[in-house]
Structure formats: structure tokens, C-alpha cells
Amino acid sequence: MKLHEYQSKQIFARFGVPVPRGILAENATEARNAARELGLPVVIKAQVLVGGRGKAGGVKVAHTMEEVEVLAERILSLTIKGLPVRRVLIDRAADIRGELYLGVTIDRARRRAVLMASSAGGVDIEEVAATTPERIVKVPVDPFIGLPDYLARDVAVSIGLAREHWPKFIHVARGLVKAFVDNDASLAEINPLALVATDGGIGLMALDGKMVIDDNALFRHPDLAVMRDPDEESEAERKARNADLNFVSLDGNIGCLVNGAGLAMATLDIIQHFGGKPANFLDVAGGARADKVATALRIVLADPKVKVVMFNIFGGITRCDEVARGIVQAIEEVRPTVPMVARITGTNKAEGDRILASANLITAESAAEAAQKAVALANAAAA
């Protein structure tokens, strides 16, 4: 689950990370009132869960009250990468003297969290990684220990931060790591972590913030679960989540319904191997009963891009006959007009095959055979 910038910065602040005072606004009048309270100049930022807001015109600096209203109204009328801008964050503009990048994410190769830092802040970290990877410093973090001072100091030295800023950097880095661990995040990012002029000299401040929370941990964080933005998900993804299905929309035309995440990934691979394009990842998980499979099929068939549906079911925990009943139940309810290819094997396979035969589905004995038939049917539909 992605959090908006204003939500992420609120969490960072609770863990001691300095953030600018900001006020959320839903219209131009609220934006003007916020600017009056904060003082000019202010930065007006679109709150949408995509990158590239600045390039799309979603981040502007206003120096007068008239500018605040005009720019806020303009930004609130935008749709950025398919998402409407419903709110803007009004921040007091900072006197920036330098920009850093600081983030914590999961390094799957190391099987632990990793702190990343760079002196190249304010730009896409992916761009830095692709063009000048040597500018990114990475250190593993033990979640039970946190980030020791000496390790944070080593990072500050490695990115060339001046010595007088080390204590502030250590404080920010430790706070970010703790925010990441305590909230079961998969990403906590500050870009830029800016060197800003203040009355007391030069300080560090998180001018932007991003957090992604592990959905599987939300039962431990009801306060975070209520922050979910409905615009983040498609209608199909929202229905799938409510039905406890693992579903991700893709761009292809072959709908997939599989039990088990590993088998689902292998199914996507084998479809692509034979020249096809999957329309989704959908894992109904082990032990799925007929009603759950029927719900999954309705979600897949709701996608107008889907020209054929492929079932790839291994009946271990999930019985083949249960899945077959779910498929037939969904067919009777939805009345699909696209062909469907089914490969099921495992527990109660014979009974499952009998049930599917009654619905006149195209069957296959192997995943490869099923994928080839599905790709051929999709190609024929597209011709």
C-alpha cells in the first residue's frame, strides 16, 4: 500500500525526521488560507501516488496569494498518469543549499533491509543507479539492532557530507530506519533530504517523502490501513483484495487463473515463451473453494482486453473438483463469450476433468499445451 507524501512525512516526523510544516488543501480557497498561515513563498504539490509530478506540472512555487489560488486551481484540475489530483500539499518554501537522497528498502539478495544514500538528491534514484551507480552507498540494516551511529556516520562520510552535518544526518538516518521497521514498510524514501538555511544555520529537512507498506502486515497497523487511497487500485484489484485474492492487472490479452504464486509466475513465463501476453497475475491460493474461484473468474472476465482465459491448477491443498465447480459456477453466472483453456492436475483430477467436460472447456494435459492453445486462440481473436 502506497502512502501519499503528506502521510509519509507525518510518519517521518513522529520518528524525529525534520519535515517542513505543511497544510493539506482540497480547493484554491483552502490553499490560499494555508499559504496565509504558513507565510510566502510556498510550494504547492499535487498529492498523487505516481512519480514525475514535477514534470507533469504538479509541483509549483507561489510567491503571491494570487499565484497560490491560480496555481492550486490549475494543479487540482490535472490528471497525472491516469490519476486525478484531489488534494494539494502546501509547504513553506525552503532555502535549499544542497540535496541528498536517503532511503530504506528490501534487498532480496541480502534478505534484509538496506539503507541507501547518495549525494545526487532531487532526481530519480533509478536514473542515478543506471548512469552513475557508484554515487549510491548501500549498507545492510539489522531490524533487531537498527542503524548504529557508527554505520550512519560511515554513510555520511561515503557520500561526502561535510563533518558539521554528521550529527543531524545520523539522527535522520536512524529515524528513517526506525520508521521503516516499526511500520512494516517495504520502502521509506526521502528525496530530497535537503540542506536548508535556517535561523540556526544549515539544517537537514525531508522536503519530500514516500512510503510503501507491506499489505500483509496491515492487520498490525489499522491506523495505516485506513490511509489507503482508493485511486491507487483499479476496480478489479480492489474487488480482488476484498475477496482475499492476489491479483495484479497487466497489459496482455490472456487472462490467467492459477493457484499458488510460484505456479502463477511460471504460467506468465510460459505464456510469454510461446509468444503470448498475460492480462493479469491471479493467485487464488491453496484451499480455494468454488465460490472464491468463481469470484476470481468474474474479475478476470471483467477486463475487456481478455480474449481467452487459461486455468492452470495444481490440486494439492486445492482439490481439482472444487476448482472445476468454481469454474462452471462462474460460467453459468457470467456467461462468458471468450474461449477458455483449462489444465488441472492433482487431487481429484478425474472428477475435475469430468466437471469441466460438461462445460465444454478446452482442456490440456500440460501447462505447455494449455499455454500454446491459449496463445493460438488469442492470436486468432486479434487477427
Image (spheres, rainbow, N blue to C red):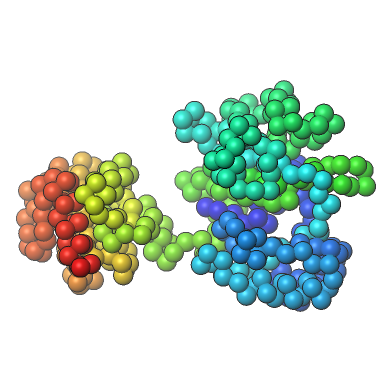
Q: Is residue 283 visible?
A: yes
- Residue 274 pos. (x, y %): 21, 49
Residue at 52 percent of width and 37 percent of height: 106
Q: Is residue 139 above or below residue 60?
A: above
**Most distant residue in the top direction:** 150
Left or right of 82, for residue 313? left
Left or right of 106, for residue 204? right
Left or right of 343, for residue 22? right
Compare residues 170 and 51 and report the one nearer the observer: 51
- Residue 188 pos. (x, y %): 61, 44
**Most distant residue in the right direction:** 199
Residue at 48 percent of width and 49 percent of height: 215
Residue at 23 percent of width and 67 percent of height: 382
Q: Is residue 359 above or below residue 18?
A: below
- Residue 89 pos. (x, y %): 71, 63
- Residue 163 pos. (x, y %): 82, 29
Residue at 80 percent of width and 63 percent of height: 42
For residue 187, which quarter of the picture?
top right
**Most distant residue in the front direction:** 131
Compare residues 334 and 188 and report the one nearer the observer: 188
Left or right of 270, for residue 170? right
